[in-house]
């Protein structure tokens, strides 16, 4: 008697065949589009596809002045290691030993392969202030799968892809980004996600803006980079619209080419 849940080899083969066929069609389309671009006048359309930022542990680990100091030193370290980063939001303040008080003389940071060179420079800089930098080293996969509340760290360098417009910006951060693991359980954050009634003059957009603005003003969240990608398209394509997460709304495009 055949078992209804048994998968026949032919099913697996047919899936592979269809997948291979789809990939072949996609590659053919890409080649045709490239040939088309060679014959036309083109322009670049820029879209946002991600943000990098420093996020501090909000559970009474650092003061605001300490967060400002640590982020300034880390941004300086990034500039030293990563060339051609003219858009860094850096401070011009020069610090001297004794300017900032750290009772425990240490700071704990999450380190993965791609940012370790920067944190090595960060550690060297803080040594001048007699502050030890303790590395919690992990892989990117382990970082994604591990909850931030399970980690004994003071700050993390994050990359997240989220909508750039409110209220969706804050909603994304509080629902599908790792940001939520430290900030999602606060009362005002839960009020946003659970759609608790606001005061009559407030809208979801204003509440989301106020929440994130407070996080930024308290220096828990410090921007590093905004990642943008450029898409090459024919000049005749008009009415281009950027969708969330760096995609283009292709159905809105109008081809203005005169026949």
Image (tube, rainbow, N blue to C red):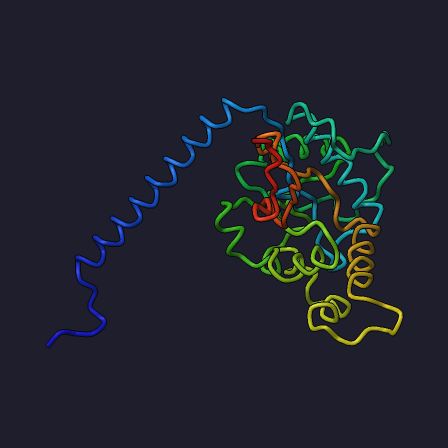
- Name which quarter of the figure residue 6 lies in: bottom left
* Image coordinates for residue 154, horizontal then vertical, percent: 69, 50
Residue visible at 68% across and 61% down in the picture = 171
Q: Nearer the viewer, residue 252 or 78?
A: 252
Q: Which residue reaches farthest left?
A: 1
Kindly tell me whether residue 96 is visible in this rendering.
no
Kindly tell me whether residue 216 is visible in this rendering.
yes
Q: Which residue reaches farthest front?
A: 259
Q: Is residue 5 above or below residue 55?
A: below
- Name which quarter of the figure residue 175 lies in: bottom right
Q: Is residue 197 above or below residue 246?
A: below
Q: How many marks are shown on the rendered structure?
A: 0
Q: Quadrant of the N terminus?
A: bottom left
Residue visible at 51% across and 27% down in the picture = 37
* Image coordinates for residue 88, horizontal then vertical, percent: 74, 32
- Name which quarter of the figure residue 85 lies in: top right
* Image coordinates for residue 58, horizontal then vertical, percent: 74, 57
Residue visible at 41% across and 36% down in the picture = 29
15 relative to 94 in the view: left or right: left
Q: Quadrant of the C terminus?
A: top right
Residue visible at 66% across and 30% down in the picture = 121
78 relative to 29 in the view: left or right: right
């Amino acid at each position: 008697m055949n078992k209804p849940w048994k998968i026949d080899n032919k099913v697996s083969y047919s899936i592979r065949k269809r997948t291979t066929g789809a990939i072949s069609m996609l590659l053919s389309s890409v080649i045709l589009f490239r040939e088309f671009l060679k014959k036309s006048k083109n322009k670049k359309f820029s879209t946002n596809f991600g943000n990098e930022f420093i996020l501090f542990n909000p559970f009474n680990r650092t003061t605001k002045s300490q967060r400002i100091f640590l982020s300034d030193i880390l941004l300086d370290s990034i500039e030293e290691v990563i060339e051609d980063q003219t858009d860094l939001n850096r401070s011009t303040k020069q610090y001297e030993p004794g300017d900032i008080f750290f009772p425990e003389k240490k700071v704990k940071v999450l380190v993965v392969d791609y940012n370790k060179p920067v944190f090595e420079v960060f550690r060297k800089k803080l040594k001048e202030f007699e502050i030890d930098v303790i590395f919690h080293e992990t892989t990117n996969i382990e970082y994604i799968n591990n909850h931030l509340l399970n980690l004994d760290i003071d700050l993390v360098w994050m990359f997240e892809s989220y909508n750039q417009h409110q209220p969706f910006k804050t909603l994304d951060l509080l629902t599908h980004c790792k940001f939520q693991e430290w900030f999602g359980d606060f009362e005002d954050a839960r009020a946003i996600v659970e759609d608790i009634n606001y005061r009559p003059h407030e809208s979801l957009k204003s509440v989301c803006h106020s929440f994130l603005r407070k996080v930024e003003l308290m220096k828990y969240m410090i921007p590093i980079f905004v990642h943008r990608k450029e898409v090459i398209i024919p000049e005749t394509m008009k009415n281009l619209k950027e969708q969330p997460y760096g995609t283009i709304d292709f159905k809105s495009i109008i081809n203005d080419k005169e026949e």
